């Protein structure tokens, strides 16, 4: 009798353990594969912004311009009819701010990229000093890896710094001895952290009062890139 009870207890224990192990191996909603593989946000030489992005297989996308929040929203859905593809599209920019949201409801994920930029100046007096950045792009290459590629005008000095106080990667541009016109840098970002990249333009302000005719050098931060990537917000 004791042997039968012991055998029954052993079978029940094995069943419970097997059930728990099976449940642990089941994929959770939050661990689903991301539907957006990579993206590139680019500003061309005219100042216009556009985007290219790659999708995983069985994925469809929908672009919505949310005029209330002034945001370019890209929604991604799982679909049996979707195929792996690259999509290119123009971006809506409100005055001096570009906002983009990538939304994946199935995985409860939302990623944001915000760019603060200024409309190109028509002031001919300062134009030759303020336009130093020709074009640039920010790309998400993989999990936590971002690439910055940019070109500057001739006779522009480029320097890279990390501002620990502000927590910002800075690219300093100034008229002077050129050290190249095309540059690339990669940045690593942990999930949940904010990646900030500022172009710091050192220009001469000829309109400042009580200054010598050569003008005084001032610093202007534009464009400014802010990436908040992969966080649960749904």
Image: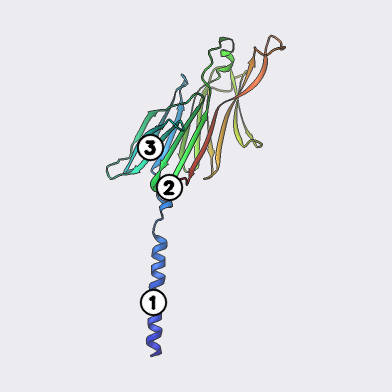
Q: Residue furthest front?
A: 68
Closest to the camera, between mark 2 and mark 3, is 2
Q: Residues within 10 Å of mark 2 (few under 14, many from 20)?
A: some
* Residue at left offset 59%, top offset 23%: 179
- In the rendered image, which residue does mark 3 sit on? 54
26 to 133, vertically: above or below? below
In the displayed structure image, the side of residue 81 where residue 1 appears, left or right: right
Residue 176 in picture, x, y percent from top left: 62, 18
Asked whether residue 56 appears in the rendered view, the answer is: no
Q: Which mark is residue 192?
A: none
Which of the two labelled residues, at mark 1 and mark 2, occupies the earlier sequence position? 1
Q: Residues within 10 Å of mark 3 (few under 14, many from 20)?
A: some
- In the rendered image, which residue does mark 1 sit on? 12
* Residue at left offset 37%, top offset 41%: 76
Q: Which mark is residue 108?
A: 2
Q: Nearer the viewer, residue 3 or 152?
A: 3
Q: Quadrant of residue 165?
A: top right
The reply to whether dot 1 and dot 3 touch (C-beta < 8 Å) is: no
Q: Nearer the viewer, residue 179 or 141?
A: 141
* Residue at left offset 38%, top offset 73%: 15
């Amino acid at each position: 009798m004791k042997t039968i009870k012991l055998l029954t207890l052993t079978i029940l224990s094995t069943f419970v353990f097997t059930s728990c192990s099976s449940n642990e191996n089941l994929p959770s909603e939050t661990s689903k594969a991301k539907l957006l593989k990579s993206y590139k946000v680019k500003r061309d030489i005219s100042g216009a912004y556009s985007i290219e992005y790659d999708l995983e297989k069985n994925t469809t996308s929908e672009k919505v311009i949310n005029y209330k929040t002034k945001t370019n929203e890209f929604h991604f859905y799982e679909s049996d009819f979707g195929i792996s593809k690259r999509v290119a599209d123009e971006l809506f920019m409100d005055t001096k701010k570009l906002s983009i949201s990538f939304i994946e409801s199935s995985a409860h994920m939302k990623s944001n990229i915000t760019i603060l930029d200024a409309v190109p100046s028509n002031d001919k007096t300062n134009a030759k000093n303020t336009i130093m950045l020709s074009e640039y792009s920010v790309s998400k290459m993989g999990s936590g890896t971002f690439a910055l590629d940019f070109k500057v005008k001739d006779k522009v000095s480029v320097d890279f710094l990390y501002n620990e106080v502000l927590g910002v990667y800075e690219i300093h541009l100034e008229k002077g001895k050129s050290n190249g016109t095309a540059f690339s840098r990669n940045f690593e970002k942990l999930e949940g952290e904010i990646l900030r990249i500022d172009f710091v333009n050192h220009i001469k302000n000829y309109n400042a009062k009580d200054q010598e005719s050569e003008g005084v050098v001032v610093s202007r931060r534009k464009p400014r890139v802010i990436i908040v990537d992969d966080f649960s917000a749904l």
